[in-house]
């Protein structure tokens, strides 16, 4: 399985560190960067090209919804997951409308975070599998003979 590159954007230092602690035990997730505000999140997303941006809805400067909207238009291969203490269906709807692929209500568990990241990545990967596919030009060669003693074993061994 591919390593999931993740960018975390949150204005609150303590919550950012908490999320990083949750992600430490996930072997297939690599934190490629951190951002403290919306503009920094956009700049780092363009520079680092993560698979997923995990961002707070209340970022300083440009808010998380606007960052998600910009990312979904400019970098369609970057998926966004919104984190928020706001559990209102209206915020969820706005997040999905802006292009977010999931919405986590704080506080959330390690399990919730892991499931959200893996579900978003796997859905994206299903549509973009060619990005991770290796270019194999393998060929299968078969030696066949109806009569024994014609040398097919010798040909197969020498070709291998």
Image (cartoon, rainbow, N blue to C red):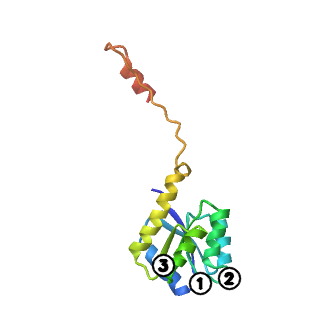
Q: Residues within 10 Å of mark 1 (few under 14, many from 20)?
A: some
Q: Residue 38 placed where, x, y %?
A: 65, 78
Q: How far separated are the C-alphas under marks 3 and 2?
A: 21 Å
Q: Residues within 10 Å of mark 2 (few under 14, many from 20)?
A: few
Is residue 26 visible to the viewer in this orientation of the structure?
Answer: no
Q: Which of pointers 2 and 1 lies earlier in the amino acid sequence?
A: 1
Q: Residues within 10 Å of mark 3 (few under 14, many from 20)?
A: some
In the rendered structure, the answer to whether residue 69 lies left or right of residue 90 reads right
In the rendered structure, the answer to whether residue 71 lies left or right of residue 52 reads right
Q: Residue 17 placed where, x, y %?
A: 50, 82
Mark 3 vs mark 2: in front: 2
On-image quarter of the N terminus: bottom left
Asked which secondary structure carries label 1, the reply is: loop
Q: Residue at x 64, y 67 (%)?
A: 71
Q: Is residue 130 above or below residue 16?
A: above
- Which numbered disc covers residue 11? 1
- Which numbered disc covers residue 61? 2
Counting labels gives 3
Is residue 35 visible to the viewer in this orientation of the structure?
Answer: yes
- Which numbered disc covers residue 43? none
In the rendered structure, the answer to whether residue 150 lies left or right of residue 11 reads left
Asked which secondary structure carries label 3, the reply is: helix
- Which numbered disc covers residue 19? 3
Q: Which of pointers 1 and 3 lies earlier in the amino acid sequence?
A: 1
Q: Which of pointers 3 and 2 lies earlier in the amino acid sequence?
A: 3
Q: How far separated are the C-alphas under marks 2 and 1?
A: 10 Å
Q: Which residue occupies the extreme front position in the image?
A: 90
Q: Residue at x 43, y 79 (%)?
A: 108
Q: Is residue 144 above or below residue 114?
A: above
Q: Are marks 2 and 1 in contact (CB under 8 Å)?
A: no
Q: How far separated are the C-alphas under marks 1 and 3?
A: 12 Å
Q: Residue 104 placed where, x, y %?
A: 48, 75
């Amino acid at each position: 399985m591919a390593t999931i590159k993740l960018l975390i954007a949150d204005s609150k230092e303590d919550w950012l560190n908490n999320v990083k602690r949750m992600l430490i035990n996930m072997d297939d997730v690599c934190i490629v960067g951190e951002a403290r505000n919306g503009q920094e999140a956009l700049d780092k997303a363009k520079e680092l090209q993560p698979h997923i941006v995990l961002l707070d809805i209340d970022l300083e400067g440009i808010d998380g919804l606007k960052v998600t909207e910009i990312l979904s238009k400019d970098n369609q291969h970057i998926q966004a997951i919104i984190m928020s203490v706001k559990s209102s269906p209206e915020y969820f709807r706005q997040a999905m409308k802006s292009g977010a692929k999931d919405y986590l209500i704080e506080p959330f568990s390690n399990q919730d975070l892991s499931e959200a990241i893996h579900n978003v990545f796997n859905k994206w990967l299903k549509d973009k599998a060619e990005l991770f596919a290796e270019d194999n030009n393998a060929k299968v060669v078969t030696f066949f003979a109806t009569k024994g003693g014609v040398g097919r074993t010798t040909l197969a061994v020498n070709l291998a």
